[in-house]
Image: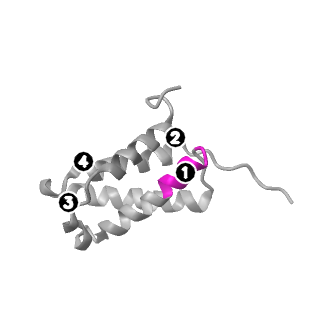
């Protein structure tokens, strides 16, 4: 299965692209639709790393956090200015969408 068919590989590729994207220093103080872009980027970075490392698996708490980020991105995207590189934020949106759509919850741990 190649990256085009495997959601975990797709998120990993998108994450790598994002890491190689130059960070625009203007975003450090930018809040769009009430959302701090640095916080949004940092939180999703952590979640994508963990999700990929876990083979596409998050527990309920992790998924709740990713859904919150996805909701925030959906508020931000219509407000992003052309000079704020919308492709960057669309890529983050796609990563969050893939995680939400393709998460495999971890098996229940019995005691």
Counting other residues with Cα less than 10 Å from the Cα at mark 3, is it few (<14), some (14-19), or many (20 or more)? Answer: few
**According to the image, label 2 marks what residue?**
8
Instruction: Give yes or no for contact between labels 1 and 2 (Cβ–Cβ under 8 Å).
Output: yes
Q: State the CA–CA distance, disc 4 to disc 1.
A: 22 Å
Instruction: Give yes or no for contact between labels 3 and 1 (Cβ–Cβ under 8 Å).
Output: no
Counting other residues with Cα less than 10 Å from the Cα at mark 1, is it few (<14), some (14-19), or many (20 or more)? Answer: many
Of the numbered discs 2 and 4, the one sitting upstream in the chain is 2
Magenta region: which residues? 47-55
Q: Is mark 3 on a helix, strand or loop?
A: helix
Disc number for residue 51: 1
Residue at (43%, 29%) from the top-left corner? 4
Of the numbered discs 3 and 1, the one sitting upstream in the chain is 1
Of the numbered discs 1 and 2, the one sitting upstream in the chain is 2
Disc number for residue 79: 3
Q: State the CA–CA distance, disc 3 to disc 4.
A: 13 Å
Instruction: Give yes or no for contact between labels 3 and 2 (Cβ–Cβ under 8 Å).
Output: no
Whole-percent x, y for residue 61 in the image: 59, 62
Residue toward you, 61 or 13: 13
Task: Name the side, left or right, on which 86 lies relative to 94.
Answer: left
Residue toward you, 49 or 40: 49
Q: Residue furthest right?
A: 111
């Amino acid at each position: 299965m190649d990256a085009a068919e495997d959601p975990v590989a797709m998120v990993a590729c998108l994450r790598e692209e994002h890491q190689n994207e130059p960070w625009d220093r203007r975003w450090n103080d930018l809040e769009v639709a009430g959302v701090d872009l640095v916080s949004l980027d940092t939180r999703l970075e952590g979640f994508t790393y963990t999700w990929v490392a876990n083979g596409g698996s998050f527990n309920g708490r992790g998924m709740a956090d990713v859904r919150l980020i996805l909701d925030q991105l959906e508020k931000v995207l219509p407000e992003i200015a052309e000079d704020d590189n919308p492709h960057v934020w669309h890529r983050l949106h796609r990563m969050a969408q893939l995680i939400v759509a393709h998460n495999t919850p971890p098996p229940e741990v019995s005691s």
